[in-house]
Amino acid sequence: MNTSSTVINFSYFQEQTVTKVNTDNTLPFSLGFSKGGLVAECPWRLKNKRSILLGQADWKSLHSAEQRQQVEALLLGQHIISIQWYEDIGILRITFSNGYALDMFHDSSFLKVGIYMVKTAFLLSRCQGERATIKFQFV
């Protein structure tokens, strides 16, 4: 399996600071950046080199309030070090200055998925049976 990242210029988002972490589990996972933000309407996981700290299924659980606050404490004030799109495995990875990585991916051949990074926008969407579609929109 080839896991090399596809060359897409994400430089607008690099070095931005995480200014807000949504902790409401009734809403999609979202982050505010110093110049924009991210909404993940797809499966995701936050991990370090050893393990997964939290994922979308955990986030939606009513029993995960402490974990949601832990995610906020871990990411608030961190800088985006790199963003990579691994097209062949369908993962968008954001790496933060504390060594944690946020992976976003699609896990269904039926449902629509969306990852939105806004201000200078990066939109990744996939519909049933299609390859990932990447759109850039400059605001």
Image (cartoon, rainbow, N blue to C red):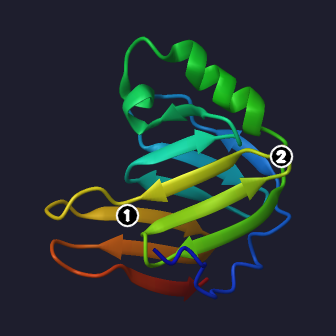
- Could you tell me if residue 119 is visible in this image? no
Q: Amino acid at mark 1?
A: Gly
What residue is rendered at 75% in x and 27% in y?
73
What residue is rendered at 60% in x and 61% in y?
93
Near-viewer residue (134 or 53): 53
What residue is rendered at 22% in x and 80% in y?
130
Write down the quadrant of residue 125 in the picture.
Answer: bottom left
**Relative to 95, 31 lies left or right:** left
* Residue beneath disc 1: 114
Mark 2 lies on a secondary structure that is: loop
Write down the quadrant of residue 21 in the picture.
Answer: top right
Is 57 above or below relative to 98? above
Q: Are marks 1 and 2 in contact (CB under 8 Å)?
A: no
Rate crowding at label 1 as few (under 14), some (14 to 19) or many (20 or more) other CA atoms within 10 Å.
many
**Relative to 25, 82 lies left or right:** right
Chain-order first, disc 1 or disc 2 = 2
Image mark for residue 78? 2
* Quadrant position of the N terminus in the picture: bottom left
Write down the quadrant of residue 5 in the picture.
Answer: bottom right
Mark 1 lies on a secondary structure that is: strand
**Whole-Å distance between the Cαs marked 1 and 2?**
24 Å
Rate crowding at label 2 as few (under 14), some (14 to 19) or many (20 or more) other CA atoms within 10 Å.
many
What residue is rendered at 13% in x and 62% in y?
110
Image coordinates of residue 121 in percent, x first then y, are: 57, 76
Image coordinates of residue 65 in percent, x first then y, are: 52, 15
Q: Amino acid at mark 2?
A: Gln
- Could you tell me if residue 70 is visible in this image? yes
Is 63 above or below relative to 29? above
Near-viewer residue (6 or 75): 6
Near-viewer residue (115 or 57): 57
- Residue at the front extreme of this rendering: 1
